[in-house]
Image (spheres, helix red, strand yellow):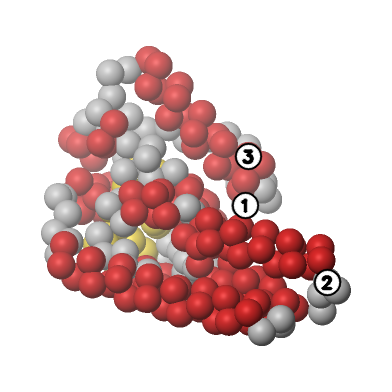
């Protein structure tokens, strides 16, 4: 039933087998998305700027994780009836800074049936998290007369229209938001430095763990450096 909207947009559709919610994302679902991309790229002259990932329900959550991990491959994500926040202990772990900047350019389209109240609420939480982390390249489409089910052709067509619409992100707003995130991270890292300076190595490590949980790959280099410094100090004196 999706043949017409896919043809209108000139898209090749690939679906993975044996990759339902009972299958682990990192062990199978995410690798299958990458394999699909490589196999199609080997057979067809595709446009790398029009490579997208998507899914339904749990597959949508897996697609969101895949887009966040590989924004250099997938330039857009269609999140149908399932999404999660990013960052923090309750969110999806953030990638290294270079990849995260690429993710900020990724187009995200949230499309959920108007009767799917649970996932509409999850979408709101996810989008709020995205805004907190300076992800503004977002579009929202509600699927009329649908519940928690696959998109009908008109809903898919509208979602694909949104996915392929050029970004309208305000560069100034993005720069200010990124600067705010960096200031907050720098403040937390300075607190770790202060704990190390006063000999509170256990407290410094606890703070590093909290920073890692919240910022993930965005703070990876600083976390590694500070942890190595603590380890060196612990080598010459007992650490609490």
**Looking at the image, which is closer to me, 66 or 205?**
205
Query: Disc 2 and disc 1: Cα gap in Å?
Result: 49 Å
Where does the N terminus fall, quadrant-wise? top left
Q: Earlier in the sequence, mark 1 or mark 3?
A: 1
Residue 170 occupies quadrant: bottom left
Residue 133 location (% of width, % of height): 37, 69
* Residue labelled with disc 2: 237
Question: Going by the image, does 184 lie left or right of 50?
Answer: right
Question: Going by the image, does 210 lie left or right of 50?
Answer: right
Q: Count neighbours of disc 2 (C-alpha within 10 A) and say few if under 14, some if 14 to 19, many if 20 or more.
A: few
SS category of the residue bearing label 2: loop
Residue 104 occupies quadrant: bottom left
Residue 132 occupies quadrant: bottom left
SS category of the residue bearing label 3: helix
Residue 42 location (% of width, % of height): 40, 16
Going 23% across and 72% down the picture, which residue do you hit? 176
**Looking at the image, which is closer to me, 91 or 240?**
240
* Residue labelled with disc 3: 28
SS category of the residue bearing label 1: loop
Going 44% across and 74% down the picture, which residue do you hit? 186
Camera-side mark, 2 or 1: 2
**Looking at the image, which is closer to me, 197 or 37?**
197
Question: Going by the image, does 166 lie left or right of 141?
Answer: left
């Amino acid at each position: 039933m999706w043949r017409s909207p896919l043809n209108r947009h000139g898209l090749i559709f690939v679906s993975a087998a044996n990759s339902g919610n009972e299958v682990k994302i990192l062990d199978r679902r995410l690798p299958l998305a990458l394999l699909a991309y490589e196999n199609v790229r080997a057979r067809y002259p595709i446009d790398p700027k029009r490579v997208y990932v998507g899914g339904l329900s749990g597959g949508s959550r897996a697609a969101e994780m895949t887009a966040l991990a590989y924004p250099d491959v997938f330039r857009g994500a269609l999140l149908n009836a399932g999404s999660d926040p990013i960052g923090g202990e309750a969110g999806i772990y953030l990638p290294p800074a270079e990849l995260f900047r690429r993710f900020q350019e990724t187009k995200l389209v949230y499309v959920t049936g108007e009767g799917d109240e649970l996932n509409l609420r999850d979408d709101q939480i996810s989008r709020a998290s995205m805004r907190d982390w300076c992800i503004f390249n977002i579009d929202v489409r509600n699927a009329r007369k649908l519940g928690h089910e696959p998109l009908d052709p008109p809903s898919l067509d509208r979602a694909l229209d949104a996915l392929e619409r050029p970004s309208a992100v305000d560069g100034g707003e993005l720069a200010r938001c990124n600067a705010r995130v960096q200031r907050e991270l720098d403040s937390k890292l300075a607190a770790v430095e202060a704990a190390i300076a006063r000999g509170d190595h256990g407290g410094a490590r606890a703070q590093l763990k909290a920073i890692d949980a919240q910022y993930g790959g965005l703070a990876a280099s600083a976390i590694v450096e500070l942890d190595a410094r603590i380890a060196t100090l612990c080598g010459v004196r007992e650490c609490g």
